Amino acid sequence: MIKNISNLGDAALYCDFGSEVNKQINRNVINYFNNLRDSNFLGITNITPSYNKLVISFDLKITSFNKLKKKVENLELKKNKNQNYNLIEIPVCCAEEFALDIKRLQKLLKINEAKIYETFFSKNYYCYMTGFIAGMPFLGDMDKSLFAKRLETPRVKVPKNSIGITEQFCNIYTFESPGGWNIIGKTPIDIFNNKKNVEPNLINPGDTISFYPISKLEYEKKYE
Amino acid sequence: MKKNMNKNYFEVLRPGINSTFQDNGRNNFYHIGIPFSGAMDNRNFLLANTISNNGINNPVLEFAYQGPKLKYIGEKISINVTGDVNFKIIRKNKNLEFSCYENIVLENNDCLDILSTNRSVYGYLSIGGTFEVDYYLNSCSTNTKAKIGANKGEKLEKGQIIKLKNIKKILSKNKIEYLNSKIENIRIIKGPHFDYFSKDAINLFFGSEFNVTKLSDRMGMRLKGPKISNIKNTNIKSEGLVKGVIQITADGDPIIMLSDHGTIGGYPKIGVVISADYDKLVQIPPGSKIKFKEINLKDAETIFKLYVMETQNLISNIK
């Protein structure tokens, strides 16, 4: 549940669900997000769920912090919102030219490449949130043996569709972007389709992701 | 039907530094990582469309610093430029000077040369008609990062053609007297991580001048000044941002989120610029100095009401 609602400037609510990062808290955040989307409260312009916070932006010409805060506090949560989550399978090619940081990870984690991939592919990952750049999913949790720090100097350009890991999380770079996550492979699938006007995101908060390895040959076939 | 109905267009002779089509922005997609975008300076955007007698969400061409040079081909059309902008029209080898905030008639073969914004950043070109642009997720606002919106998500490029439609036959003579006032003191409200900073750091933050650096664009404004040191943690678990949020990076420098900002961020938020000061904030060019002043939510709301009233007054004075 929401522990505290404060103002983020004069045109947004900052809803705090706690300081920990776990699936249960995040499910709560997403449940509020879904219920708010259905509520049609006047003036809301954006709702941004993250690990354990929910930011609600509004149009200050239409409503105000105190008015909207009351509405959110009195919001009746409808259940069965959790049924729409998908299990999505994402192919990953771990060829040398795509796994930009696998050598660094072997040294850092003191595990060999085969074991890193075996561990990585053996788990399903939960999507806590999407964003930063369009469609980028923040997934977790990694096996503890794969917890690795970010690169000390972030890359200026991480190639589009790269799979990155850092600490308990992994993500997919939906666009070429600067970034400091450890890159272990690349998917031939576009996670964000900027040609699609409806649901351009393949992965949404609450979804579960299962990665599976493919060869370079399969990668090239899928890419075509 | 005239046979040249669809033959009205601009040819881009020079694209300018950062010229993009914008409208009111894109609501309700922060959760998938798509920022609001839209015209940076909302008041000048509204004035541009109102002077043109257009709908308030009609696309405009936004430019920064140096604007585009456009050759016009077609029937007579009224246009206007808003902001603090130097521009001229070249007609049959003659340079004609005009002011911002007044409709001007462009004729076939005229060349509109938007030279520069004066001690400001953004300006707007609106036409008595509509730029023919692509829409994505209910807005034409160009987001060059996600490659969405008008012009396939790209800035204007040299040589391209901008098609125009719905050109108004009645050439409006609307104009208004308006001077863009400048500010150096940015009013802000305390952010959720205010207590991540020591008392000394807070005093430094409100007591010092910060330089607006060249690394500023539609996504954010990077500032340099005294380092604002953090006593808790230089990182937080990533969470939602809104425009106007001031994050303090791990290096101790403030960065203000602007209209194309990343939707989530992992630096502590020391404050948020009040909505009423946003238009003026985005117009502060690199090399300028700014200072922050803290106010409370109630005052910010009152100041915003005044800002809206002032804009309404301006609009009702257009004739």
Image (tube, coloured by chain):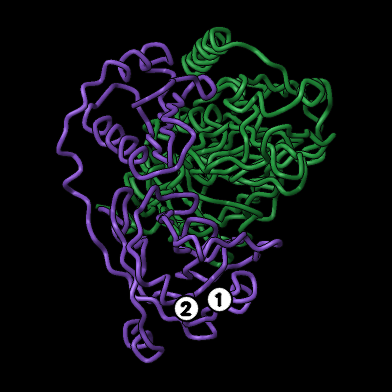
Chain colours: A purple, B green
Location of the C terminus of chain A (image quadrant):
bottom left
Residue that mark 2 sits on? A115
Q: Is residue B251 above or below residue A160?
A: above
Q: Amino acid at mark 1?
A: Ile
Residue B221 falls in image quadrant? top right
Residue that mark 1 sits on? A111
* Disc 1 with disc 2 on a shared chain: yes
A71 relative position to B298: left or right: left
Disc 2: which chain? A
Q: Residue visible at 43% across and 48% down?
A: B33
Q: Is residue B134 above or below residue B193?
A: below
The percent position of residue B242, horizontal first and vertical second, equals: 51, 34
Q: Residue visible at 35% across and 83% down?
A: A214
Disc 1: which chain? A
Nearest the viewer among B56 and B172 is: B56
**For numbered disc 1, what is the local secondary structure?**
loop
Q: Is residue B319 visible?
A: no
Q: Amino acid at mark 2?
A: Lys
Residue A51 falls in image quadrant? top left
The percent position of residue B214, horizontal first and vertical second, equals: 76, 47
Location of the N terminus of chain A (image quadrant):
top left
Label 2 neighbour load within 10 Å: few <14, some 14-19, many 20+: few
**Contact check, label 1 and label 2, Cβ < 8 Å:** yes
The percent position of residue A212, horizontal first and vertical second, equals: 33, 75
